[in-house]
Amino acid sequence: MSKIAFVFAGQGSQFVGMGKDIITISKRANQIFENASDILGYDMKNLVFEGPEETLMITENTQPAILTASYAMLQPLVEAGIRATVTAGLSLGEYTANVYAETLSFEEAVKTVRLRGKYMQEEVPAGVGGMSAVLGLDDETVAKACSDVSEYGYVACANFNCPGQVVVSGQLTALAKVGELLLSSGAKRVIPLSVSAPFHCELLKGAGEKLRKQLETIIFNEPKIPVIANTTGLPYDNQSVIKDLLVDQVSHTVKWTNSVNYMIKEGIDTFIEIGPGKTLSGLIKKTDKNVRVFNVQDSQSLKDTLENL
């Protein structure tokens, strides 16, 4: 019997039209979009299905849109009787994982991530910070390079995504310098990311503290199944730690490699990525090629997943 993990997509995976055909095959999925519109006061279907892309890409729109689409994409799996033993999500996706584990409601989550996006965008002015993906070097080499260029400004490791892939985040001058150093140290590529702020680093600490005020209005429940925290790569001990870990997540490193390895160590042999894109599927395969990995983002991928399970 397979042990299944549901993993949920993060920011950067969004595209206009995500989830559009899922609502034609699941009334529950359609209702998720309707609920999001009622909660947020604008037409979520129109934003996600029609765009324009520039509006969808605004962070305070992107985050609730991905959460809504991902939670909607989950519904046909649940209706088919598929259940996870453990759940996790990359960055923003940790909120969708929490909704699945019932630590908070969809309504609370979608309101919270809209504010999360707003605070993260506002914390660092446009044109000051950014992020780059580093391919082909180990975590320690990348971390040391960030330290070595500190005279040029702040830069740090933001995401440990999989073996040989680290994302760095910080001020643009320091990002450029660390990129040069990493390429000279043997990196295969250093790729600037299309993001509007330097996420998951100390530059966003103020955004996390603003978010804390919103999280303090929520009474978190004990998770129905284990939820893996981004900043520790381990399950929450209990519901009392969730708020602090979600605050920390805004300005601390995402340990996705550790999260995946922990789940595999606990016997997970099947991962289902739920949400737009297949980014997490690729990262998981690079972490351990022996596990089965599926994704659900539309009717065809849902069909393929259900046929293979």
Image (cartoon, grey):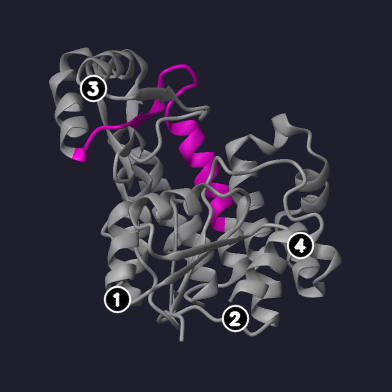
Residue wearing tag 3: 186
Residue wearing tag 1: 266
Q: Residues within 10 Å of mark 3 (few under 14, many from 20)?
A: few
Q: Earlier in the sequence, mark 2 or mark 4?
A: 2
Q: CA distance from mark 2 to mark 3?
A: 43 Å
Are the residues tagged 2 and 3 within 8 Å (C-beta)?
no
- Measured as percent of width and height from the top left, residue 26 is found at 80, 72
Q: Residue at x 57, y 65 (%)?
A: 108
Near-viewer residue (143 or 102): 143
Q: Residues within 10 Å of mark 4 (few under 14, many from 20)?
A: some
Residue 72 in view here: no
Near-viewer residue (60 or 101): 101
Q: Earlier in the sequence, mark 1 or mark 4?
A: 1
Q: Earlier in the sequence, mark 1 or mark 3?
A: 3
Mark 2 is on which residue type? Ile
Q: CA distance from mark 2 to mark 4?
A: 16 Å
Residue wearing tag 2: 82
Q: Earlier in the sequence, mark 3 or mark 4?
A: 3
Residue wearing tag 4: 299
Residue range highlighted in magenta: 112-139
